[in-house]
Image (cartoon, rainbow, N blue to C red):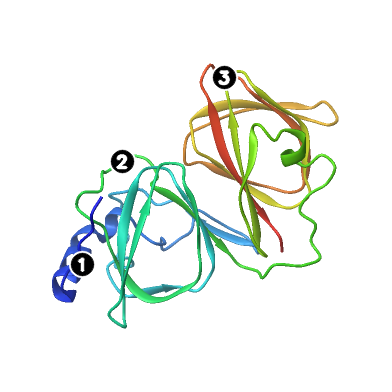
Amino acid sequence: MQFPGLPAKRAFALCLLAGARLAAQKAQPDFENDQAIVNAPHPGIDVPGFARKMHDHPLNRVMVYLHPGGELLHYRDGSTKVLKWQAGEVQWSPASGLHFSEIPSANPVFSGPMIVDIGIKKAGDPGKVASAALDPLRVDPKDCTLELENSQVRVIRVKLGPRRSVPLHEHVLNYLMVYITDGNVRETSSEGKAEVSPHKAGEFRWSGPSRQRVDNLNDKPFEAVVVEFRN
């Protein structure tokens, strides 16, 4: 996919037309607490003025992309950054200065959320231990893989085949579960309490430290990303 550079005036005009297709942040977040702020923008929604004008990102972010695409970030100093991503890709996005976004016209339009944008509100705590004896990366390394890790977050990708399970495992940090695929899973706690939770791609949920088994109840693969907060 090619995103040729454009003169500033023309790029800004295109931004006015396309900015609402992929907003960097909505006026009201989809979720916020003392650790994270989460936005899951839809293409075509009206986000008055935000992505159509210069804005910045004061927080480091984890970006979970649900569909393939890209954008151009035009910075105040005249530089341009080209972003590209694939469906299901996770990227670390450091805090950045003033810019405006241009969405290439070649980008496909989807009816559901385009991304899940997770802002990290606190610095990492070096004293926070991210894993334990029942860490999912130890318990089930085939289905649970490390996506990225730094001082603020640890991101684990979970990919389960049809009717496959992750055995009893433990998250010792607060975390956000982001669903990459539609699905239907059963979570059974260490005390034996079971809960079935259907979900759609792009949905997410916040959870505190927990210990559970996860079963994919569908005849289709299940995929999710777990963003653990080291703060």
Q: Is residue 108 left or right of residue 214?
A: left
**Residue underneath mark 1:** 5
| Residue drawn 50% across the image and 74% down it | 58
Residue 44 vertical placement versus 170 (above, below)? below
* Numbered label attached to residue 162: 3
**Residue topped by disc 2:** 110
- Badge 2 element: loop
In three-dimensional space, the C-alpha distance between marks 3 and 2, rounded to whole angstroms, equals 26 Å
SS class, disc 1: loop
Where residue 24 appears, as percent x and y from the top left, is 39, 62
Q: Secondary structure at mark 3?
A: loop
The amino acid type found where label 2 is placed reads Phe
**Distance of mark 1 from mark 3, alpha carbons?**
44 Å
The C terminus: image quadrant:
bottom right
The first of marks 3 and 2 along the sequence is 2
Crowding at mark 3 (Cα within 10 Å: few <14, some 14-19, many 20+): some
